[in-house]
Image (tube, grey):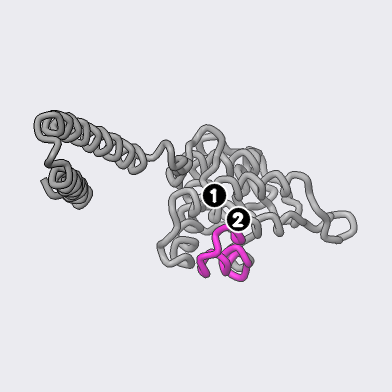
């Protein structure tokens, strides 16, 4: 049981060091303990216990619940999921948890639906008239358990949180292509300028030979372009 899970259960169970009747009319002591570790049921005639004893009783009882919840979920639950479902099971009973939609949806891999299903367990029987009623305390507890189940406990970053996708202009791929393209354009431009300068010189020296020179320029540009593209394609495929 995580410390956060233990704290959640302690918070909502509340600590009473003298025996009392829970809303269901069962003698209880400490943090919701109804049976002592030795198997003896709590009675209203039992003497008060210490805080340390109450915590010890709670941990002993939770170990049993956690083991059973882990078994029912085939050992797949994360620490936070296990803590949240153990808290629910400790509150509603293992039999109720085993038949709950929380467990069924979890085992079907429907985590969002399972998280939402915690909220269904927000009612208790009014000790005055025996009618099931929504209890504010249970509403708050179910919300806290659902948040823990989804690993969104306040102060704890979610490990599964991922960085928002970058825009195309911010991506490394775009930057690499843009850089390569810029270099390619610059190289081709320089080559064309050099060939143009050579053409001008030859034209002035041999005006009778322009046709052949133009053909040479075209071939040179095409060849240079092919070499630049081949080099870029090699880099794209990781060939050095």
Q: Is residue 185 above or below residue 117?
A: above
Secondary structure category for the residue under label 1: loop
Q: Residue 25: within the magenta?
A: no
* Disc number placed over residue 150 in the picture, else none: 1
- Near mark 1 (Cα within 10 A), the count class, few <14, some 14-19 or many ≥20, is some
Give the CA distance from mark 2 to mark 1: 7 Å
Dominant SS of magenta comes to helix
Magenta residues, as a range? 97-115
Q: Position of residue 56 (x, y in %)?
A: 48, 43
Quadrant for residue 204, please give it: top left
For the residue pair 81 and 59, the one nearer the viewer reads as 81
Give the residue furthest to the front.
208
Image point (47%, 58%), residue name: 64
Q: Position of residue 167 (x, y in %)?
A: 47, 40
Image point (21%, 50%), residue name: 233
Tell whether 82 sits left or right of 171. Answer: right
For the residue pair 240 and 71, the one nearer the viewer reads as 240
Q: Are marks 2 and 1 in contact (CB under 8 Å)?
A: yes
Residue 185 seen from this side: yes
For the residue pair 114 and 56, the one nearer the viewer reads as 114
Q: Position of residue 179 (x, y in %)?
A: 29, 35
Tell whether 225 sits left or right of 89. Answer: left
């Amino acid at each position: 049981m995580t410390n956060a899970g233990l704290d959640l259960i302690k918070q909502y169970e509340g600590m009473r060091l003298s025996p009392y009747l829970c809303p269901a009319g069962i003698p209880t002591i400490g943090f919701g303990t109804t049976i002592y570790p030795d198997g003896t049921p709590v009675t209203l005639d039992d003497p008060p216990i210490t805080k340390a004893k109450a915590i010890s009783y709670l941990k002993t009882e939770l170990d049993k619940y956690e083991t059973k919840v882990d078994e029912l979920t085939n050992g797949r639950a994360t620490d936070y999921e296990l803590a949240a479902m153990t808290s629910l099971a400790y509150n509603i009973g293992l039999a109720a948890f085993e038949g709950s939609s929380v467990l069924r949806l979890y085992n079907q891999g429907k985590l969002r639906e399972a998280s939402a299903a915690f909220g269904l367990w927000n009612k208790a029987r009014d000790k005055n008239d025996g009618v099931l009623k929504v209890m504010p305390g249970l509403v708050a507890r179910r919300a806290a358990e659902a948040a823990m189940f989804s690993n969104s406990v306040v102060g704890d970053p979610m490990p599964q949180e991922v960085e928002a996708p970058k825009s195309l202009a911010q991506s490394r791929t775009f930057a690499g292509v843009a850089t390569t393209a810029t270099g390619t354009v610059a190289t081709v431009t320089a080559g064309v300028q050099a060939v143009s300068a050579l053409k001008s010189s030859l034209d002035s020296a041999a005006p009778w030979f322009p046709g052949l020179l133009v053909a040479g320029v075209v071939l040179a540009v095409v060849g240079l372009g092919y070499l630049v593209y081949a080099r870029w394609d090699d880099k794209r495929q990781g060939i050095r």
